[in-house]
Amino acid sequence: MASWTLCTSGAAVVKAGTHANSTIAASGSALQGFADAAEGKIEASTRKSYIDNYSSLSIGVKNMLSDVASSIVAMDIIAYDNTGYLAREADMLMNKLDERINSGLAILKDFKTNALQSPL
C-alpha cells in the first residue's frame, strides 16, 4: 500500500487538535502506519480500489477520500495518548471524526464513478 496517497499527515494532525501528543504527531513511521491502515480500511469498507485508480478520480472524490482518511488517522493520533486534552475535548473530537468517517464511507460505498455528470 502506498503511504499518503489519500491524505497528508498535516491534515490528520490538524484534525487531531492542538493538544495532540507532539511526539506521535511528529513520528513519520507511526503516522505512515496509521495512514496505511486508513487506506486499507477505506478500500475494504467500500470494496473499491481507490489507491490504484487515484489519478483518474475527480477532485470531489479525492477530497472525500482525504477527509475520511485524515479523520481515521486523527482518531489514531488521539487514541495513542489523550492525556494532553482538556476535559471531554478528546471525546468531542473523536465523536466528530467518527461522524465524518461514517458519513464519508457511506457516500463512498454507494458512489458510482461512472455516474458523475457535468452540471448543466
Image (tube, rainbow, N blue to C red):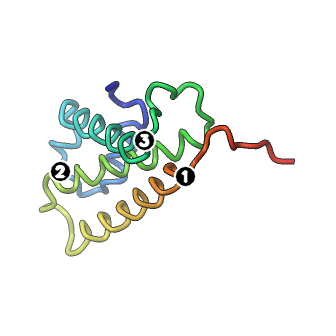
Which residue is nearer to you in this view: 22 or 1? Answer: 1
Amino acid type indicated by mark 1 = Asp
Position of residue 2 in the picture relative to residue 111 (left or right): left
**Relative image position of residue 120 (x, y in whole percent):** 87, 48
Q: Give the labeled residue for mark 1.
A: 110
Please rate how many residues cluster around mark 3, counting C-alpha atoms within 10 Å: few if below 14, some from 14 to 19, many from 20: few
Task: Find residue 47 and name its label.
Answer: 3
Give the residue drawn at x 45%, y 48%.
Answer: 67
N-terminal-most mark, 1 or 3: 3
**Relative image position of residue 38 (x, y in whole percent):** 32, 42
N-terminal-most mark, 2 or 1: 2
Please rate how many residues cluster around mark 2, counting C-alpha atoms within 10 Å: few if below 14, some from 14 to 19, many from 20: many
N-terminal-most mark, 2 or 3: 2
Please rate how many residues cluster around mark 1, counting C-alpha atoms within 10 Å: few if below 14, some from 14 to 19, many from 20: few
Task: Give the secondary structure at mark 1.
Answer: helix
Task: Find residue 21 and name its label.
Answer: 2
Q: Nearer the viewer, mark 2 or mark 3?
A: 3
Structural distance between the alpha carbons of marks 1 and 3: 10 Å
